[in-house]
Amino acid sequence: MSSSRVGLRFFQNSRAAFREAFRRPGAQGRRFQTSDAAAAGQQSTFQRLWNSPIGVKTVHFWAPVMKWALVIAGISDFQRPAEKLSLTQNGALTATGAIWTRWCLIITPKNYLLAAVNFFLGCVGVVQVSRIVSYRRSVDGSTKEAVKDLEHEVVEEAKGVASAAREAVKKSS
């Protein structure tokens, strides 16, 4: 009976020693932050960027970097004729940019890099939507008719998506 108690104590102590051996000095439960302000002041700029909660080794850094591709694609569409632009796609970019810009400033940690890319995504969307609306207004002659055409287009696209979804459900069952 005493040998089992010794074994249990051995494993309890070894587990604590294992945790202590692989624990970073000064870490207190936060994965990428050091609790010691003096140590943070002595770190180089690269080390602070690396150890930041929104640093290079996190998705908080790489998601905005990759999202700049959407902004660049939207900017490249400035040269396309307005009649070839999709209102629903650019409306979605506008809404995404507005919603996520606000969200990035609410969450903790605040992600200003992601807020910036979403802000520019929304700006690109607003420019494109305004180009589409002004083009359709010039073709149709009035704003009310252009808005009716836009509504009709959106409704028809939604009906098409719904019918495609119904067909997919019928095929799967």
Image: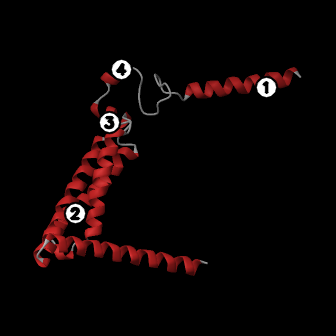
Which residue type carries mark 2? Answer: Gly
In what element is the residue under mark 1? helix
Q: Earlier in the sequence, mark 3 or mark 2?
A: 3
Q: Earlier in the sequence, mark 4 or mark 3?
A: 4
| Side of 161 relative to 148 (left or right) | right
* Up/down of 83 relative to 76, above or below: below
- Residue, disc 4: 37
Q: Which mark is residue 74?
A: 2
Which residue type carries mark 3? Answer: Leu
Cα–Cα span, label 3 and label 2: 29 Å
Q: Foreground mark, 3 or 2?
A: 2
In what element is the residue under mark 3? helix
Mark 4 touches mark 3? (CB < 8 Å): no
**Residue 76 figure quarter:** bottom left
In what element is the residue under mark 4? helix
The C terminus appears in which quarter of the rendering? Answer: bottom right
Residue farthest to the right, as pictured: 1
Which residue type carries mark 4? Answer: Ala
Q: Callout 3: few (<14), some (14-19), or many (20+) C-alpha neighbours within 10 Å?
A: some
In what element is the residue under mark 2? helix
- Residue, disc 1: 7
Q: Earlier in the sequence, mark 2 or mark 1?
A: 1
**Residue 1 placement (x, y as % from top left):** 89, 23
**Residue 145 figure quarter:** bottom left
Mark 2 touches mark 1? (CB < 8 Å): no
**Residue 109 placement (x, y as % from top left):** 37, 36
Q: Earlier in the sequence, mark 4 or mark 1?
A: 1
Q: Callout 2: few (<14), some (14-19), or many (20+) C-alpha neighbours within 10 Å?
A: many
- Residue, disc 3: 49
**Residue 48 placement (x, y as % from top left):** 33, 32
